[in-house]
Image (cartoon, rainbow, N blue to C red):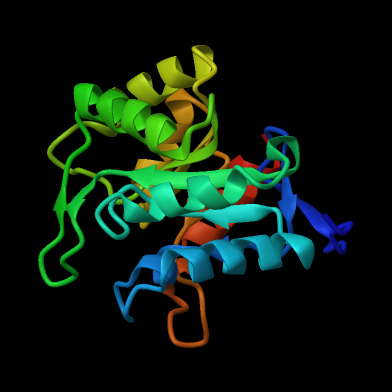
Amino acid sequence: MAEPQRIPTVNLGSQGLVVSKLGLGCMGLTGTYNHPLPEDQGITVVKHAFNKGITFFDTADVYGANANELLLAKALKQLPRDKIQIATKFGVLKLDFANLHVKGTPDYVRSCCEASLKRLDVEYIDLYYQHRVDTSVPIEQTMGELKKLVEEKKVKYIGLSEASSDTIRRAHAVHPITAVQIEWSLWTRDIEDEIVPLCRLVLVET
């Protein structure tokens, strides 16, 4: 295998996670906004990204109804695991953007993690996100189970996706949050009021 090119790395959060500055979001490999790629082409895309210096790959259990994690696993088997950072997510039962069904109970958190570990065929997940917050379950309960998974070395770092500032604060009080995944663009600037300053405080300065 040719020596991969280099992309600068960055510290993600303050807990020690280092990733390539550019990551690959894998959702499109198995559809959602487009037709799924044939498996061999999807694997080629992942390997090409790695050879161009990308080491950070983002997936989720709900992408392609588990197929995305399975595809990524096949690609990563051909790459050095110790040079790759895998981010995956739990918490969305069905990818229906008009009406997302979410779940964040402790038993569900654990079952999702175990299933993702099996599909990805890895011993640990580098960054494990709660894909969407289940407001019917106190975030402290969800985070409590995620903390246990970190202690058991099944997960290295914890992230939140589309979380409010209050949820980030409460979650971080249970266990340090490494990353918050949320839209920040010219079109969406409202997170600059509370969430960005909070993340700079709790994710960078702790």
Q: x and y percent of residue 114 in the render?
A: 35, 26
Q: Residue at x 35, y 20 (%)?
A: 144
User: Considering only vertical position in the picture, is 181 above or below 179?
Assistant: below
Q: Is residue 53 visible?
A: no
- Left/right of residue 82 with respect to residue 152 in the rendered view: right
Foreground residue among 57 and 47: 47
Q: x and y percent of residue 112 in the render?
A: 29, 33
Q: Residue at x 68, y 38 (%)?
A: 81
- Left/right of residue 34 with respect to residue 105 in the rendered view: right
Q: How many marks?
A: 0
User: Considering only vertical position in the picture, is 18 above or below 174?
Assistant: below
Foreground residue among 12 and 191: 12
Location of the N terminus by quadrant is bottom right
Foreground residue among 39 and 185: 39
Residue at the limit of the structure toward the bottom, as seen here: 187
User: Considering only vertical position in the picture, is 54 above or below 160?
Assistant: below
Foreground residue among 6 and 170: 6
- Left/right of residue 42 with respect to residue 144 in the rendered view: right
Residue 54 is drawn in which quadrant?
Answer: bottom right
User: Considering only vertical position in the picture, is 4 above or below 93?
Assistant: below
Q: x and y percent of residue 118 in the render?
A: 39, 30
Q: Residue at x 29, y 60 (%)?
A: 64
Q: x and y percent of residue 108 in the render?
A: 21, 29
Q: Residue at x 36, y 57 (%)?
A: 162
Q: Is residue 39 visible?
A: yes
Location of the C terminus by quadrant is top right
